Amino acid sequence: MSLSGLFILLAAMPVFGTGIFQPLADTTEADTLVVQENNTTTQIEYHDLAEFIDGIINTQRRGNRLSGVTVSVVQNDSLIFARGYGMADIEQERPILPDSTFFRIGSVSKTYTWTAIMMLAEEGLLDLDTDVNQYLNEVEVEEAFGEPITLRHLMSHRAGFEDTIRLFAVADDDPRSLSEVLSEHQPKRVFPPGERTSYSNWGSALAAQIVEDISGTPYKTFLQEQILDPLKLNYTILDLPDEMSSEKRKNLAGGYKKGQGALNQQNFMQIGAYWPAGGMAATATDMARWMKFHLNGGELDGVRLLSEEVHQEMWTRAYNDRPHGADVSHGFQDIPYRGLRLLGHAGGTAAFLTNMILVPELNLGVFISQNSAESYQPVMQFPNLVIDHIRGESYQPFLLEESDTDELDELAGTYLNNRRVFSTFAAVMGLASAATLTPISNQSLTLSSMGEETYYVQVPDQPDLFEDASGQRLSVIRNDRGSVIALADGMGVHTMERVGFFKNPNTFMIAFGLSVLLSITTLLGGWRRFGRENSPGFSSRIAGFISFLASLSVFLFVAAVITLAASFAGFDLSQMADNYPSASMFFTHYAGWLTAIMSVIMLGGLWPAWTDAGWPLLRRLHFTVYALVLIFFASQLWQWRIIGAAVV
């Protein structure tokens, strides 16, 4: 939803809905934001920025039904703006205060892991290019592709792991240690190290285990004593909600989700020992200090944890295969935006969404978090809107231009997000990750995914780089022969692999649809012939019975898919620890096996159908086509790991 021209200026009102607005003059360290860019100096007064931000947040809160939002902005080593909007607890009418209300920051927690890694590397305790197995005591990364995985791979999200959602099925009170769950849940390596970017929570948690094993102290202790305490990050919490002291817990914002036109309480996401990958909480003002630390090159208030050289290395890309597109710089999302370089990280849990963006050229940092995870627009759009306002930019949609597409036709096709499961039943979720690229002209294309289309225009003098109207870039990845094999999105942490016919989700849907259609016609044909055939022979009865059972197996699979879809429709990430894997997953798995078995039996039934059944030619052809379609459908069930894989 575009927000241009829709800012609702309510900063002068002491109360808006259930929240209060306060300028927090006691925590604001500067009244003016000074930006120097292209030999031009721009000054923006505090009240101008405050009114602008209030307008954005108030509009987003109404448009997305958000209970609460917390924001902070830093620039030139000063806290420029910090404000809370709405309620941390609606029932208790507890407002959000930016210097005391804790928000769970999700994967922004990983930036502390990567900082810890760089600190140990600077001390000479770690080498970013050494096999990580040399640093691990109880976990061992399995061999694959004849190449080891290094910390630089992990920090670039290029270790080649498939995704795993089992992290979210570990309860907060699970007694297993991080090393135990890492060993039990190790994902399959599906790409050679360095080849593809694919975001990995497991890989990030593995890095935290390395910090623990090398430092000889628990990871939580290392963060507290080596990072939080020296930087005086006194309002950053490493404890999970049920582990917090009563004082901290009462200041933790509650989570909310939409329900029946109002809001319902949203339970906190549970990840147990995997908390380093996304379990931290902090106030907006503490996050402001964290941003200042990194904008200052590893120093805050005279305390230096990283040398400028090492911090510069941290913000240097390890790979250069898309220098003008989005990528990852040692754990930080590295995003080109309208001539600027944005570094930061986003994060999400069942009840919170967060974004932290740093702009070194402007010495600017923007943090935002909301206590609802149902709409990404507020947290993803807000930093860019602030940047545009500071620079005097405005949003302008592209005008569609259609013409010959010869120059971009080679890009057309279906692409699958590489951040997915490949080896277990959860691979079926990849059916929803398809994106279709369609050239519109020789300079523009659209990318369609999950019912939404994004229009991109080619960046001048960059034939494999495209940009949408909001400034997000899409990069084309080619192999050594120059063939298009993948795309990289504008977040920097995902790539999409180009797929052929057999791996295309549309192929699965076609095979599924044909199986259902032929099952229906088989049953209708049997119903039409019932009582009309005179003493059918044994072979005829056998072949007919086989086709009847095959049809029933397909309809049983349809019922299983409906049950599975219904369970996902009401899916609550916070409840995974108690409900994963679900009964509907096992139902679909075994129904798929039954259909696959019947497809083989159908293939065997071709012999009596053609040699001794006494059927007319049309019925024999129908039986043959049905058998072949079921065999192909069974191969698709295997391809998408509905059968032939563990149900996790």
Image (cartoon, rainbow, N blue to C red):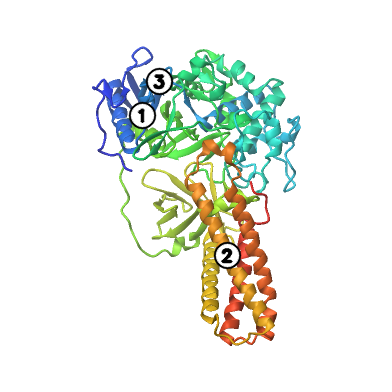
Dot 3, crowdedness within 10 Å: few (<14), some or many (≥20)? many
Dot 1, crowdedness within 10 Å: few (<14), some or many (≥20)? few
User: As rendered, which of 300 and 512 lies closer to the eye?
Assistant: 512
Amino acid type, residue under disc 2 in the picture = Val
Amino acid type, residue under disc 3 in the picture = Pro
Amino acid type, residue under disc 1 in the picture = Asn
User: As rendered, which of 35 and 608 lies closer to the eye?
Assistant: 608
- What secondary structure is marked by label 3? loop
Q: Which residue is mark 2?
A: 554
Q: Is residue 222 above or below residue 347?
A: above
* Residue 339 on image: x %, y %: 41, 38
Q: Which residue is mark 3?
A: 98
Which residue is drawn at the image coordinates 58% and 34% (left, top)?
330
Can you tell which of label 1 and label 3 is closer to the viewer? 3
User: As rendered, which of 135 and 512 lies closer to the eye?
Assistant: 512
Which residue is drawn at the image coordinates 60% and 82% (left, top)?
620
Q: Is residue 256 visible?
A: yes
User: As rendered, which of 351 and 277 lies closer to the eye?
Assistant: 351
Q: Which residue is mark 1?
A: 39
Q: Is residue 228 left or right of residue 11?
A: right
